[in-house]
Every structure is written in C-alpha cells, then in structure tokens.
Amino acid sequence: MNNQANEIAPAEPAPQDFKAPVFSDDKLVLYFHPYNFYSQKVLLVLYEKNIDFTPYVVDLCNGEQYSSWFLNLNPKGDVPVLQDGAFIIPNSPQIINYVESKFRGERHPTLKPYRPDSLEYDKMSTFERAFTRLPVGALSLGSFIHDDLKLSPKAPFIGPVRQSCLKNNDKVMDMLRRSMDETDSTICLSALKQKLDIQVRRRNLVASRTDFQRVLDAVRNVLLFVEQELSKQRPRKEWLTGDELTLADVSLGLLLQRLYQLGFENYYWGYGKLPLVEGFFLRFKQRPSYHKLMPSSNFEILKEMWSMTPANYKLGATAGFLGMAMFAAFAHK
C-alpha cells in the first residue's frame, strides 16, 4: 500500500446515520461479522446444529455497532447478537446456550451430549473454560507488532492488511469515545466505557514484548494440556472427550484456525511438537461446517464486504478498508 493511500482517512458516518434493518417476526437473525472470532464460533454452532437463520453483517469498520439501533440490541456494542422474535441474546455464550436448549432432536444434534453429572461433561467444561479464557484479540493484535516471532501469516492477515490493522487501532477507540459522547443512555455509557477500558488495557498489554510473551505462554500451556489429555485416551477418540463433537471441540478448532491464520502453527505445534493437537486440527478442517465457515478462498467474503461499503468510503484505500474491517472484527472483544 503506497504512502498516499496510508494518509487517506475514510469518511466515517456518525452512528445515528445507520438505519435499523427490518425483519419479519418469525426470523431467527444473527448480527455478526465474518472475521470476528466470537461470531465465527456462533456461526459454526449454528451450522453444526443445522439451524436455519438470517445473517446480517454489522458494518464494524464504519461504526454500525455503535449506532442507536444496535445499542438497543446490545448496549456493549459487541457482535454477535441473536434475535429470535422478541428475544434478544447478546453474546456468544448466551447465544450458544439458547440454541442448545431450543433446538434439539435428530435434526439438531447437541453439542453438549453428556449428562451434567458425568465425568465427560466435567472434562468438556474444563476444556471449554480453558479455551474461552484465552485473550484472542490481544493474541491477534500482538502478532502484528512483534516481528521477532517470525510468523508465517495466511490470508486475510497478510501484507498491507496487517499494517492497516495497526494504523486503525486508534480509530476504533475514537469511535468508542464519540459514541460515549453521543449516547443519552446511562446503560450504554457504562457499557461503552467498560469496553474502552478493555481496549486500552489490550493495547498496553500487547505493546510490551514481555507482557505479550505471557499471552503466548498461556496459549502454549493450554495446548500442552490438550496434548497431554489426548495422549491419555485409551482407546484413542476422534475428539477431546469422545467420538462426538462437542462445544469444547468447536472452541479448540477455531482457536487453532485463528493461530494458523496468524502464522503460529510452527511456533506451537509444527515440526512434530504437538502431533495430537495437529491431528485434531486436521480432522476439524474436514468438517462440512468448517468449509461453510472458512471457504476455500477468502475473496468471496472480501467481495461481499466491499459491495456493502458506502460509495464515499470507497474513495479510501482498499487495504485500509479491509484492515479496518478485520481489525474491528478481531479486536471487538
């Protein structure tokens, strides 16, 4: 990306410029972003459970998540959000619990197949807690900053997009501050302030190589734990707790996918370091739901995002747009 493109500031509409989408009352609607890690988790769950839904891509790069209509759905301004008629479910754990409870039966396989008092359920819950506590947003951002890691990133986190993601860090926080100034809701103000504090702490965390190493070590410890647990299986099972895919497998599979895209595969499991973790990832990538979530080419997703961009915004740099979209997506929580 040339220097002139770097200097072009995209025209960012104020949050109130966005119009609320209208859907019929009988629609199950998912408000999400295709590059947001937590959106991907919900999408994969919906695909695995064969649930029909209407997708709505929230324009994170232009601040639609801070528009009045979206803050009415989720005062935190976070995706994903699920709307089922009058019911609004505002974050990924609640969404997953909701669809697990509502959609059951032969057509909608469960991702929590064990009795709550069983050893398998305890193992599944232990894995899930370990994965969900990892700071994926900080991991992503820090990987762009510290070149000494010598990573091999994959599309879409490559080349000028990486630099654009870094340049747009402050823009995300500026949108948050602007939304805090414009909201007249005490609930929204409190939620947005909390979110801004998290963004500032994340930026400070990843700026320090020593502090970021603690994030990398936390990921390594979790993957070592997975490798050890898989090695104990007698006989060997296909997934973490058995031959049925569970929510814990969804979480681990998506974590490995994000690490792979960021270029961490050799840092963590390549060259035979964690063969059972690597084998798990290879099996996970064979799932039909994975192929629906991660098409063979990212171009179709990028083309869709570009087609949704306002005309005045397209005057900016293409890489800048994509970088802002993806930064907003992975730094969203």
Image (cartoon, rainbow, N blue to C red):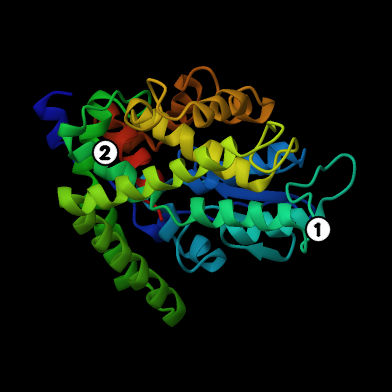
Locate residue 81, reporting x and y percent. Answer: 58, 56
Label 1 close to label 2 by CB (< 8 Å): no
Residue at the image position 36 percent from the left and 34 percent from the top: 311
Q: Which residue is mark 2?
A: 143
In the drawing, what numbered circle is on residue 115? Answer: 1
- Above or below, 5 relative to 57: above
Residue 36 seen in the figure: no
| Quadrant in the picture for residue 240 | top right
**In the rendered view, would you say 177 is above or below 123?**
below
Q: Amino acid at mark 1?
A: Arg
Q: Amino acid at mark 2?
A: Ser
Task: Please tell me which residue is depicted at 72% across the width and 56% down the height of the picture.
Answer: 119
Q: Which residue is drawn at the image coordinates 45% and 41% (left, top)?
A: 223
- Relative placement, left or right, of 291 versus 118 is left
Say few, some or many: other residues with alpha carbon within 10 Å of mark 2 (under 14 / 14 to 19 / 20 or more). many
Label 1 secondary element? loop
On screen, 126 above or below 217?
below
Between 299 and 143, the residue placed more toward the observer is 143
Quadrant for the C terminus, please.
bottom left
Classify 10 Å Cα crowding around label 1: few (below 14), some (14-19), many (20 and above): few
Q: Quadrant of the N terminus?
A: top left
Q: Nearer the viewer, residue 274 or 304?
A: 274
Which residue occupies 72% across, 37% down?
48
